Image: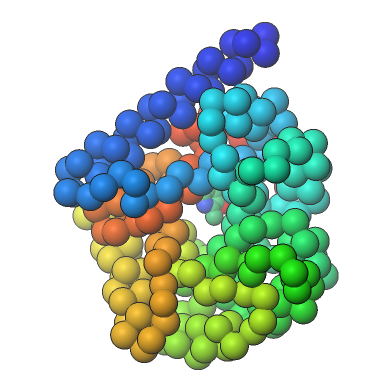
């Protein structure tokens, strides 16, 4: 495919996803400005990111630290925002703290402490979402709802971090009612933390196949990969 073709194919997909978001907002009486689109570019080639950036997309989500570092450097986009959304080990925390703007996948205080320690003091705080395990079994990632208040307290106390909200990856299902049940649990968990005094404004929920259900339940940021880019090519 020529570079120009790649660009227009990606611009078209971006417009389609933005239209899905706008329609879901309309259906639920929400302002589309209240839902941000994170382009999940893990496993996608650099040209695809370039094409999407050329079409105006500025928020990118990555799950693998080394792959992300190569892209962040090569894309060289000063006004792009980089979100780390994958499982994170302590030994990669310094790279993430130094090169990303957001981390969505905090489920242990140990990782948060490592990020805090490595965030440059004169940089803006790293924006944090706590990953919550709302639909159990499938994933080992995520803090249980019962453990959320304690983790939120600990993260809030760490310098260099700013707790913004919650993230979840519910078990995939075709039933939009079941999708909404899971997203509702995350919204309720977020409301409970707000009642405890946490100033949260972000619900990171909804992906290519369930963003409508997520927006219906109050998502403020959808993380969309394949609907924007097509199938993933690279592996972590
Ligand atoms: C891969 C991934 C996505 C995007 O998934 P798609 O189904 O391709 O939209 C969103 N969130 C997380 C945490 C991911 O790992």
Q: Using the rendered image of the protein, determine whether residue 173 is visible from the camera's viewpoint.
A: no
Q: Quadrant of residue 115?
A: bottom right
The residue drawn where x is 45% and y is 20% is 12
Q: Position of residue 211 (x, y in %)?
A: 35, 46
Q: Position of residue 15 (x, y in %)?
A: 41, 26
The residue drawn where x is 52% and y is 17% is 9
The residue drawn where x is 31% and y is 85% is 195
User: Is 138 left or right of 92, judged from the image as shown?
Assistant: left
Q: Quadrant of residue 232?
A: top right
Q: Quadrant of the N terminus?
A: top right
Q: How is the image coloured?
A: rainbow
**How many discs mark residues in the rendered view?**
0
In front: 96, or 77? Answer: 77
Q: Position of residue 134 (x, y in %)?
A: 40, 70
Q: Position of residue 24 (x, y in %)?
A: 25, 42
User: Is 109 left or right of 156, judged from the image as shown?
Assistant: right
In front: 63, or 199? Answer: 199
The residue drawn where x is 26% and y is 47% is 31
Q: Using the rendered image of the protein, determine whether residue 4 is visible from the camera's viewpoint.
A: yes
Extreme front residue here?
A: 122
């Amino acid at each position: 495919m020529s570079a120009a073709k790649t660009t227009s194919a990606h611009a078209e997909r971006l417009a389609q996803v933005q239209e899905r978001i706008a329609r879901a907002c309309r259906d639920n009486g929400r302002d589309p400005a209240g839902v941000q689109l994170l382009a999940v570019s893990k496993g996608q080639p650099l040209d695809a990111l370039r094409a999407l950036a050329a079409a105006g997309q500025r928020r990118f989500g990555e799950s693998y630290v080394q792959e992300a570092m190569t892209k962040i450097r090569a894309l060289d986009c000063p006004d792009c925002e980089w979100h780390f959304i994958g499982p994170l080990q302590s030994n990669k925390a310094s790279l993430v703290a130094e090169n990303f703007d957001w981390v969505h996948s905090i489920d242990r205080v140990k990782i948060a402490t490592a990020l805090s320690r490595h965030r440059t003091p004169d940089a803006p705080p790293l924006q944090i979402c706590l990953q919550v395990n709302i639909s159990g079994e499938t994933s080992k990632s995520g803090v249980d709802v019962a453990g959320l208040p304690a983790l939120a307290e600990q993260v809030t106390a760490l310098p260099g971090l700013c707790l913004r909200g919650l993230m979840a990856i519910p078990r995939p299902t075709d039933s939009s009612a079941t999708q909404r049940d899971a997203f509702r649990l995350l919204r309720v968990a977020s409301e409970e933390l707000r009642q405890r005094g946490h100033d949260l404004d972000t619900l990171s929920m909804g992906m290519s196949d369930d963003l409508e259900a997520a927006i219906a339940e109050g998502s403020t940021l959808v993380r969309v990969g394949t609907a924007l880019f097509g199938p993933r090519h690279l592996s972590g």
